[in-house]
Amino acid sequence: MNKKLKTKNSYLVQLPLIAERNRGNLSFCESKKQIPFNIKRVYWIYKVPVNQKRGGHAHKKTEQVLFCLQGSIRIELDDGIHKDSIILNNPNIGIFLGRMLWHEMEDFQKNTILLILASDFYKERDYIRDYNTFKKLTQK
Ligand code: TYD
């Protein structure tokens, strides 16, 4: 079951888990099912030095679901009004990041691997990288 968060346009995505005795685990997701959009892009983030932050932006239209496949991170969410601070450390649980959600990933454990599924191709013009600009847009 998905769990809503305080910040708008965000929730935790719980994936099916097939845990077979002696064979290990398998999780999966599909477009328009566990992932609420058609997946157009997949990218992954790895070899992040401990103490390094990533993210620090919002997307105007692109939606994403982020999974921590290995290791652990803390993700800070901010919709301009409400904030959330979530630890992701289970490959079976992702976080949906909808439109206009400022997010920062920090507290990377060594050897952490993040997998991100995105609703659109990479377009720099879809990013808001300045927090004050983001804040103004969300106060309208
Ligand atoms: P960025 O989204 O800023 O990374 P993070 O959110 O982890 O801090 O992207 C870092 C760089 O990679 C930036 O120059 C844009 C480039 N990039 C692509 O070319 N394609 C992509 O799909 C992504 C996500 C980033």
Image (cartoon, rainbow, N blue to C red):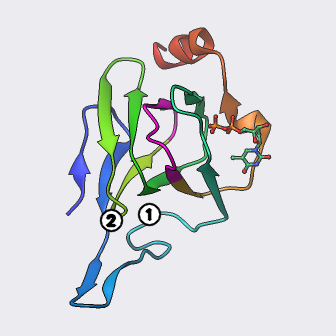
Ligand 1 is in which quadrant of the figure? top right
Q: Residue under circle 1?
A: 36
The vertical placement of 10 against 53, above or below, is below
* Residue 34, percent from left and from top: 38, 69
Say whether residue 130 is left or right of residue 93.
right
Q: Residue 94 is drawn in which quadrant? A: bottom left
Other-residue count near label 2 (Cα within 10 Å), few / some / many at <14 / 14–19 / ≥20: some
Q: Residue under circle 2?
A: 92
* Residue 96, percent from left and from top: 41, 50
Q: Give the residue at x 57% y 14%.
A: 131
Q: Residue 22 is drawn in which quadrant? A: bottom left
Q: Give the residue at x 70% y 37%.
A: 126
The vertical placement of 2 against 28, above or below, is above
First to last magenta residue range: 99-113
Q: Give the residue at x 40% y 74%.
A: 33
Main structural element of the magenta stretch: helix, strand or loop? loop
Say whether residue 103 is left or right of residue 82.
right
Between tags 2 and 1, which lies in front?
2
Say whether residue 112 is left or right of residue 130.
left
